[in-house]
Amino acid sequence: MRKTALAAIAGLSTIALVACSGSDGGSGDGSSSGGSAEAPDAVSIIVPADPGGGWDQTGRALAQTFTGDDIVGSAPVENIGGAGGANGLAALANEKDPWTLMITGLVMVGAVETNASQVRIEDTTPIARLTEEPLVIVVPADSEYQTLEQLVTAIEDEGQAVSITGGSAGGADHILAGLVLEAAGLSSEEIAANLNYVPNSGGGEAVSLIIGGQASVGISGVGEFVQHIESGDMRALAVSSEEPVEALPDVPTITDEGYDVVLTNWRGVLAPGDVTDQERTELERLVAEAHESESWTTELETRGWTDAYLPGAEFDEFLTGNISEVTTTLKNIGLVE
């Protein structure tokens, strides 16, 4: 079996090649890299999803850190859901205010491909990667599936009768479902025929479907489902990390259950593609200040997020590799041609 690890690892290679926004960290407007921009009083945050999910949690946690620690005076959050973040990506492309950050992550990388988005992440200015988080596969509390093996067997035997819900089509949750079936020996054609994936634009919708018994299975970040697992409304079958996670210590990994799959969801922030070098430097500084604050550390601990901070050029490099990896994986499991 093949191990697939699209994890956002902070110790990734430090090769100096940089893509997306240019190897010197500059914008596409030809401005010089010297000097500095005046610090803004406000930074707007676009969450490219409906309220209730991991992107929304990340955006609001960052906004709270910005204002709570007086890094900026205000940090309004706007939700622009749909198309796995592609709608928010289009809004960022049209944004005239350089002091704007948009939450991004592995979900958006996949959604750009599955939605054939005209605006791509490569058209933006990467500012920083912030966190990574394993996913968890859950079932309703009264589900007949007690193990991941039982679930996979049911999908093989019953196909579309077993519904799996999670985030946007082509996102991390969808990819994980495909990878588990691939690891179980299904071909891309069999995965396409058997996998009944019900996408949602926000984590709250998936929770309602699972708890209400309208979906057989749910997949999302641990932080989005942990409270429902602890309350007994959901039962966790496996997590997608290399090792069991602190928030769910008794839940086995997918690998422990016999399927050689490791997948870690990451989240970060992008700026408009036409910001100047000086504006990019200032945005990187503001995010770095937030990352170093005690408030942000508390948010990480409270939500079970792993610190995966990568600034500027390093984030550029990571994105280049991640986009390539995800595109290959989507092809392998039949989600894109």
Image (cartoon, rainbow, N blue to C red):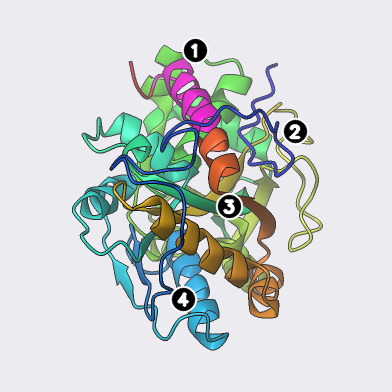
Could you tell whether 175 is left or right of 111 in the image? right
Q: Residue at x 63, y 74 (%)?
A: 231
Residue denoted by label 2: 255
| 4 or 1: mark nearer the eye | 4
What's the residue type where badge 3 is placed? Val
Q: Dot 3, how many residues are within 10 Å of its Cα: few (below 14), some (14-19), or many (20+)?
A: many
Q: Dot 1, how many residues are within 10 Å of its Cα: few (below 14), some (14-19), or many (20+)?
A: some
Q: Which residues are magenta?
A: 320-334
x and y percentages locating residue 262 in the rendered image = 68, 34
Residue denoted by label 4: 63
Residue denoted by label 3: 138
Residue 162 in view (yes/no) = no
Residue denoted by label 1: 187
What's the residue type where badge 1 is placed? Ser
What's the residue type where badge 2 is placed? Thr
Reply yes or no: does residue 325 show up in magenta: yes
